[in-house]
Image (cartoon, rainbow, N blue to C red):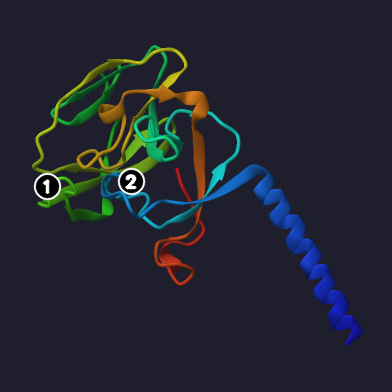
Amino acid sequence: MRSFTKVLIWITIILAVFLGVVFAFFEPWTLPADDGQLAASVEPTMSAGDFVLVTRSRGASDGALVRCPDPDAPGRYVVGRAMGHGGDVIDFVGGTFQLNKKIPPAPYACDVAKVTMKNPASGDDEDLNCFVEEFAGGTHESLRGGKSVDRDPHTEVATGTVFLVSDNRVLHLDSRDFNTVNSATCQRIALRVTGAGGVGDSKHRFTVLW
């Protein structure tokens, strides 16, 4: 009995130390489910209700999926991919993202190549195509296509700011909507601990997010 108690004590100590180290560097956060536009914009990489770890250090390196304070709603956050920094020129032509007049390659389709999502603004169904995009030495999935009519902005990114782009390029909530943000306020989303389905959602448990 004493041996079991000692083992239990050591397990508790080790777990406490581990959690202390984790929370020293990462902040736990759950993606809100009460904002339909935000929920749509983070697909297919994330989903509303995902429980994630966000780095406590701040900054937005090229291609990173980051959480930044919402410029239009104090106390809330926006999520996007850092796709342009000071000196870069961002264009959307026909809804297609361009960085300094170049389109990032998207050489192949996702495992689930076509998805249908409801447009939170209109309530209409949008048929979207999923492609694996290459950017800043990594890859990520992005949704494109759809029937929504969108404006094609031209932005020259100011020093100290970052242009955020939603992985859902059609049903977006990004710098096309709220302009660039201060890169020093952003935090990288590093790891999904559980998906929206909770601990039983094995498909989306302990997923590194890029």
Q: Earlier in the sequence, mark 1 or mark 2?
A: 2
Dot 1 amino acid type: Ser
Residue at left offset 31%, top offset 49%: 35
- Rounded to the nearest angstrom, the CA distance separating label 1 from label 2 is 18 Å
Q: Are marks 1 and 2 in contact (CB under 8 Å)?
A: no
Quadrant containing the N terminus is bottom right
| Side (left or right) of 109 relative to 65 | left
Which structural element holds mark 1? loop
Q: Nearer the viewer, residue 202 or 79?
A: 79
Which structural element holds mark 2? loop
Residue at left offset 10%, top offset 40%: 148
Q: Residue furthest bottom?
A: 1
| Side (left or right) of 59 relative to 7 | left
Task: Where is residue 49? Give x, y as percent.
Answer: 40, 58
Q: Nearer the viewer, residue 111 or 142?
A: 142
Pointer 1 local density, CA inside 10 Å: few below 14, some 14–19, many at least 20: few
Dot 2 amino acid type: Val
Quadrant containing the C terminus is top left
Q: Which residue is mark 1?
A: 122
Q: Which residue is mark 2?
A: 42
Residue at left offset 45%, top offset 39%: 75
